[in-house]
């Protein structure tokens, strides 16, 4: 027995009294099919309805609905323990109407936006995904990418159509061939019955496309369509957008965020871009100055280290330990290579206390990588490297200093 799908004839009906016709089990819970149902099963890019089922005054959640045949049973996954329902039990099914309306707004908005790209630019929708935070469509323009003014035009045009309160009708056909009398913008051969959704006058529609989802009866119920961004995707335009209450909530949140950011920069939102450009220029200048200062510090420290080494009676078989937080680890690495290139038979131990990182450099026969491998673990460190240089990271600066001291004593 197939389920009578009430949503196909009345998408606004919230509840219905029905009879359990089939029972399955999933993860220890009952999954039921009913003689009739207001629940839309996931399909056509639209998520399923959620809601609840009532049995003898007891409520159970319906977390998902699905089908295995568009003309067969609708199965409702419940949170009721397995064995709760029995054949022919009388139940009341009730959908989350807010969720249904959101899905209808988003689905019709997607149709209308896709139709807009088709009518304006000849774009073909090759993909559709309705996510929790946004919707995406992939518009194929034979490799051409949409410009920002074209996106703005499409957004303006679709919202004009939404405000026009165009009627939305659904026509059913027994097979694909019969549906070809409709002026659909994209023909997709399909087995079985076909439903075609038309926005506007059927003789000259704003949009017309085959779809199995639920849609409001008038375009104005979509509320609005807001395009967020467009990115290249496999030679197509991936459009990120949303509709209705979801779009309104995001635009409101973005507006508040923009105001907060502008307030932090002591400017109006309209002046924020120029203020950020000035900030970026200032940061770039500071980075250049910092790089020059870093190079200067490295040169000064190199001279100082080599001077100290030259005062030793012998450079052979010695080690030198250096520690700083003024330089970054990468800058310390540059200093280490610079110093070791002008020494012989030296183990250079360089520490960065802030990150508990120890760098080793060797201009002799000692293998830095081997030293790290054999001794860093004894002090809670781990790392590796080559013969001429290596690094290890420790749990604390204290552990790092203990490791450095042990190496220096070993070499001496």
Image: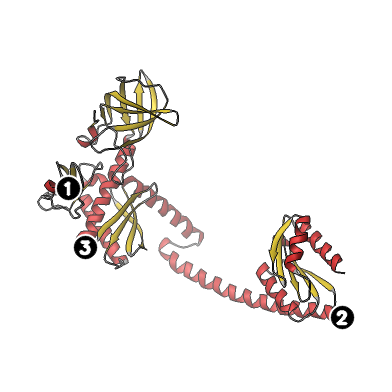
Q: Provide the secondary structure element on which disc 1 rests.
A: strand
Local packing at callout 2 (Cα closer than 10 Å; few below 14, some 14-19, many 20+) is few
The residue where tag 3 is placed is: 122
Q: Residue at x 33, y 42 (%)?
A: 47
Picture coordinates of residue 172 (x, y %)? 15, 41
Q: Provide the secondary structure element on which disc 2 rests.
A: loop
The image quadrant where one finds the C terminus is: bottom right
Mark 2 or 1 closer to N-term? 1
Q: Are the residues at dot 3 and dot 1 in contact (C-beta closer than 8 Å)?
A: no
User: Looking at this view, is 368 or 132 the one in front?
Assistant: 368
Picture coordinates of residue 379 (x, y %)? 78, 56
- Asked if 111 appears above or below 327 in the picture, the reply is above
Q: Residue at x 85, y 74 (%)?
A: 317
Residue extending furthest right? 313
User: Looking at this view, is 222 or 214 the one in front?
Assistant: 214
Image mark for residue 96: none
Side of 132 where 279 appears, left or right: right
- Number of numbered discs on residues: 3
Residue 130 in view in this figure: yes
Picture coordinates of residue 212 (x, y %)? 24, 43
Q: Quadrant of residue 122?
A: bottom left
Q: Provide the secondary structure element on which disc 3 rests.
A: loop
Q: Residue at x 84, y 73 (%)?
A: 318
Mark 3 or 1 closer to N-term? 3
- Asked if 101 appears above or below 142 in the picture, the reply is above
Residue extending furthest top? 56
The residue where tag 2 is placed is: 311
The residue where tag 1 is placed is: 198
Picture coordinates of residue 310 (x, y %)? 84, 81
Distance from disc 2 to disc 1, alpha carbons, whole Å, reads: 90 Å
Q: Are the residues at dot 2 and dot 1 in contact (C-beta closer than 8 Å)?
A: no
């Amino acid at each position: 027995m197939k389920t009578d799908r009430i949503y196909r004839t009345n998408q606004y009906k919230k509840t219905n009294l029905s009879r359990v016709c089939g029972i399955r089990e999933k993860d220890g819970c009952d999954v039921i099919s009913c003689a009739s149902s207001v629940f839309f099963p996931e399909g056509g890019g639209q998520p399923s309805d959620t809601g609840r089922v009532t049995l003898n005054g007891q409520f159970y959640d319906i977390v998902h609905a699905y089908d295995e045949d568009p003309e067969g049973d609708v199965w409702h996954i419940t949170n009721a323990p397995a064995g709760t329902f029995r054949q022919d039990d009388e139940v009341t099914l009730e959908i989350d109407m807010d969720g249904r309306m959101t899905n209808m707004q988003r689905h019709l908005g997607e149709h209308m936006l896709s139709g807009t790209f088709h009518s304006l630019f000849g774009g073909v929708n090759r993909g559709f995904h309705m996510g929790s935070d946004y919707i995406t469509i992939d518009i194929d323009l034979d490799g051409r990418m949409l410009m920002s003014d074209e996106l703005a035009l499409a957004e303006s045009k679709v919202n004009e159509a939404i405000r026009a309160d165009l009627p939305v009708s659904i026509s059913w056909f027994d097979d694909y061939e019969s549906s070809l009398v409709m002026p659909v913008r994209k023909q997709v051969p399909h087995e079985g019955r076909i439903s075609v959704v038309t926005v506007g006058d059927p003789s000259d529609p704003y949009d017309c496309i085959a779809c199995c989802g639920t849609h409001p009866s008038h375009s104005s119920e979509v509320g609005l369509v807001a395009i967020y961004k467009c990115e290249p995707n496999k030679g197509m335009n991936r459009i990120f957008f949303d509709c209705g209450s979801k779009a309104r909530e995001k635009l409101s949140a973005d507006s508040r965020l923009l105001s907060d950011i502008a307030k932090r920069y002591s400017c109006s939102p309209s002046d924020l871009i120029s203020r950020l450009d000035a900030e970026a220029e200032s940061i770039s200048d500071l980075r250049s100055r910092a790089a020059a200062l870093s190079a200067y510090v490295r040169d000064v420290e190199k001279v100082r280290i080599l001077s100290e080494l030259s005062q030793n009676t012998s450079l052979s078989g010695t080690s030198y330990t250096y520690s700083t937080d003024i330089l970054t680890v990468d800058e310390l690495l540059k200093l280490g290579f610079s110093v070791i290139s002008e020494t012989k038979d030296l183990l250079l131990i360089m520490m960065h206390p802030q990150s508990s990182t120890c760098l080793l450099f060797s201009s002799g026969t000692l293998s830095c990588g081997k030293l790290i491998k054999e001794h860093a673990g004894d002090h809670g460190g781990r790392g590796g490297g080559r013969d001429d240089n290596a690094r290890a990271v420790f749990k604390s600066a204290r552990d790092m200093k203990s490791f450095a001291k042990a190496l220096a004593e070993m070499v001496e």
